[in-house]
Amino acid sequence: MIEFYLNDQPIRTSEPPASALLDFVRYHEHLTGTKIGCREGDCGACTVLVGELAADGQTVNYQSMTSCLTPLGNAHGKHIVTVEGINAAAGQLTPVQQAIVEEGGSQCGFCTVGFVMSLTGHSLSQKPATSQSTIAAIDGNICRCTGYKSLERAAATLTAQLADRPTENAVAWLSEQQYVPAYFESMPAKLARLRTEAAASKAAEETNTTAGSGASTVSASPSGPTGYGHAQSQNGHSNNSLRHLVTQSLIGGGTDLMVQRLEELREQPVRLVFDQAGRRGIHQDVGRVVLGAATTASHLLESELMRSLIPQLPQYLKLVSSTPIRNMGTVAGNFINGSPIGDLTIMFLALGAYITLADPAGNTREPGHARLVPGLQKAG
Amino acid sequence: MNHLDPQRHVRGESQYLDDVPTQQGTLYAAVFESPLAHGKLLNLDLSAALGAPGVVRILTATDIPGYNQIGGIVPDEPLLAEGHVHFRGQPVALVLARTEHQAHAALKLIKAEIELLPIITDPRVAAAQGELIVPPRTFKIGDSEATWASCAHVFEGVAESGGQEHLYIETQGAYAFPTEMGGVRIISSTQGPTAVQRHTAHVLGLGMHQVEVDVTRLGGGFGGKEDQATPWGALAALGAFCTKKSVKLVLDRMADMRMTGKRHPYSSDFKIGLDADLKIVAYEVIFFQNAGAAADLSPAVMERTLFHATNAYFVPNVTATAYSCRTNLPPNTAFRGFGGPQGMFVIESAIAKAAEELGVAPCEIQRRNLLREGDLFSYRQPAEMCHAEQAWDTAAQQYNLAGLRAEVELFNQQNKLFKKGFAVMPICFGISFTKTPMNQARALVHIYSDGSVGVSTGAVEMGQGVNTKIAHVAARTLGISVNRVKVESTNTTRVANTSPSAASATADLNGKATEMACAALRERLLRHAEVEYTLNYEGLEIRDEEVLAAGIPAETNWEKLVTSAFWKRVCLTENAHYATPDLHFDATTNQGYPFAYHVYGTAFTTVTVDCLRGTYTVDALRIAHDFGQSFNEVIDRGQIEGGAVQGIGWMTMEEIAYNAEGRLLSNSLNSYKIPDIYAAPAVLDVHFLDTPGHPKAILRSKAVGEPPLMYGIGTYFALRDAVRAFQPNSALPFSAPMTPEKVLVSLYPEFSASNTAWTPAAAVATSASS
């Protein structure tokens, strides 16, 4: 069962974890503000916000993501926000919406909601808004009409307004300014409760191990310590069988698999690694830096450590796709993809990175990066 | 956009085709396409697909009750392939299933047996083999042939411009419902509701009255939904007609890119002759248009190329010939500019060639040859109310032309690895459908008894703001607040026999019809006021919802006047018809008066090229544009900025690539790049020229849809200028788009076997396989 909040509504669903969040939002929940443009993360028309409870349990960090590439399972435990979740009552416009309307930044309107969500996500960021950061927030949104200059003017208005945003209690201020509805203030507590409940039901499940509870069950926690949460049983018997885990597809951010193999993955049990706490993080070890497999391009970009070691990193990462995709795409996914457009691969090959591979039993090996990717779309 | 549309867009409340609530029992359609670009269709094995879960029916050409034909200008395009296939992606069969997923899954189970026939993708090869869509056309004025000998300078060359994917963010689609009379109702994402209606009726063997087409708005069109929305509307309708169930058909992005045509690529030969004063005295050009496998709108696009072959210049001796060449690619189609940009690119190339050979700046030639009042175009219409020189000179003054050029020069002296380039792009674009009978429109205006107003026209809203303009025209003519006016969906039962929303003429045509209908209603209401309130009709007016008699408020207002008129049985509905006056054009002599008026403007482009990497930025685009008397500057500015950025995309990063088998390699957003926010020029200034507008333009506010696209052409020539600043001897072919790869190769000719060795296909093949 996948549990999350969609706007102000709790969701419990048994839809396949590798189905697209976009389809769930549009065709299951009938929220049609989120549009389909390309289904490959390149146009941004389906951008939603994904809010994750911070470790302190007090705040929710929101990032923009393209819902076409977000596996539904990655929504587990999160706050998913679509335009319907930020609209004010009685047709009132939020400051983001108002700025776009005033500058004529919406022509045919099909891409518009994506821009609204990206800019709203930016307003929820904890970092100070600069003209550069505001534009970067919409670098994954395509407007074919193309109203970029009007949108730049709208972005400038918002940057100016956000100068007044306090660092403490930003959400309260944003809600007061009507950037987001008041229910946002209650989200940390709601997500914390979700987390507690999930942990409880996971514990209950573990005491009940070889239950063989029938097909299509999904383990409750996305962040189990073994890192195989969301393992969906293939035949309903040995849920914890290593053999099955080996044959199950691993999905990181989904930014390529969800483009190439959506239909196939929907029908399969999958293992989601995106949210596993143990697979995230960047830390300095003796003589080297260790990146968790689920570290995203955005994590790299935000890491003081990485930036101090590689001062050119921001310039390079600007060329790596766009903000929402950097928020989703993982280092491991990028490496294992073996694609010539796996942009992180290029940098880490040049850096002579080593990769530690672990099998479900915990055995590891450490091939050099170049050995991992011997050829186009091959992994060693 | 209705005047409140942006408010709904930002809240995600505007309804597009895929947002229409699904009716219970709806079947989902998926199109089986030809896997080969040319061949004899020997057999189609549907058995496995018919047995697939959820599949209800699979329709082929034999299921079509009427005529299997949707060709608009030439009847050469079947709705579903019959006997032969002519391009990859040609619709062959339609799968109808209970879910979208099931419909798509079944496609993989269809087996087509096709005997492969020779594939042509190059228009010059097609022309050499006589594969022409229509006979060639020649526009001629003066005698170029006899002039060459007396020219001081004559230059020849080849210019090539690539295609362009429309990439409307909303893909093509339609939703069809069977009606109780045995007809169909279609919700379509089309710029041409009447085209969908006419062809669907033909396909189903019905009268047009049995087919209703309704359009609320499009998520972008740009010409791509003018004729090419028709197959999807007709296929959905065929499904609904045959199964008596509602049928929804929405193309996914890659199917849309594979199956639909694009802007026409052109390959052209030019010859230009100048006198000693750099006046262009003769110009000859032969255009080879890559039409694709069927006519679609290609003959009309080709014609507009000829109309705009000399852009904003007066040339006394012109011979311009065009061939519409049949190839095995999806039929290419309308795209903002409709052949005009392709024609202009060639004469700008000819001027650049002459300037480079003569060692002068291209703008020295351009400025000297701009159109003046009364100059004749090759089609014999004179330039009237001509603002070509005014646009140039105003821009030169406003933006300091000499200073901009000097800045670029200074920068290039001081920098070795970065070079700036500069170009001027004047434009002249004719407004009207060049097929004269299409220049007509109707408006149906209802005043409801509470004083609110509903307006229906043939205009389709696709982001160009036509509904806002129409609402404004209605409100202004009636003397009421725009908040009382609702612009209705575009529906063939309310307004019939419409022209598509295209040719930049939609606001003019439908706005004029709206103005006429509202003027008639206003007169009728004031006649009623004259009697009802015993007022003198002369001097009666409605202003800000007040009824004024000789400027003094009368004892009634809009609402009361409307209500009293209703009770006195005054008709509160009006239907008006507008046909642009004085237009004529003889397609046998290629002479006449095809355009209501022309739009002028000038753009300055500055770029910077990174000469180590071949990457570049468009630093500034500075435009002086002839809007006439704009009555909505936000919309009009948006059209100029948007059109220009789209034109920059066409000229720089948007590279369509097919392989020799006719397979589209640039088949997704991942391998086909369009401008993102960083690609928009850092500076994009738009100066509104002080021009009177034209009486044939709505409220003297000139058409703005297509003309600005051609400002983008300046970016190509600015990039060329920058490359030449680094590599003065580079033998640069005139070949657009100027991708960073092409720039890099041009910067270092010594590192590439030859400049022409670069093939986009090779590059795209690598990334497409990822």
Image (spheres, coloured by chain):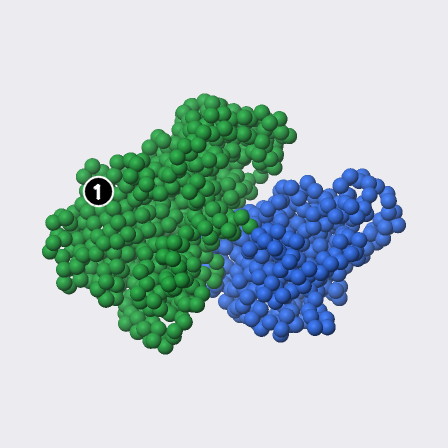
Chain colours: A blue, B green
Task: Judge by depth and name the residue closer to the eye, B413 or A162.
Answer: B413
Residue B298 in view here: no
Q: Position of residue B202 (x, y in %)?
A: 40, 27
Task: Judge by depth and name the residue closer to the eye, B541 or A267.
Answer: A267
- The residue that mark 1 highlights is B138
Task: Judge by depth and name the residue closer to the eye, B764 or B374.
Answer: B764
Q: Chain of mark 1?
A: B
Q: Residues within 10 Å of mark 1 (few under 14, many from 20)?
A: some
Residue A202 in view here: yes
Q: Position of residue A190 (x, y in %)?
A: 75, 57
Dot 1 amino acid type: Thr
Label 1 sits on a secondary structure element that is strand
User: Does residue B503 sit above or below B643 in this rendering?
Assistant: above
Q: Quadrant of residue B212?
A: top left
- Residue B17 relative to residue B361: left or right: right
Q: Residue at x 60, y 27 (%)?
A: B48
Q: Residue at x 34, y 57 (%)?
A: B713
- Residue B529 relative to residue B676: left or right: left
Q: Position of residue B629 (x, y in %)?
A: 31, 57
Farthest bottom residue in view: B414
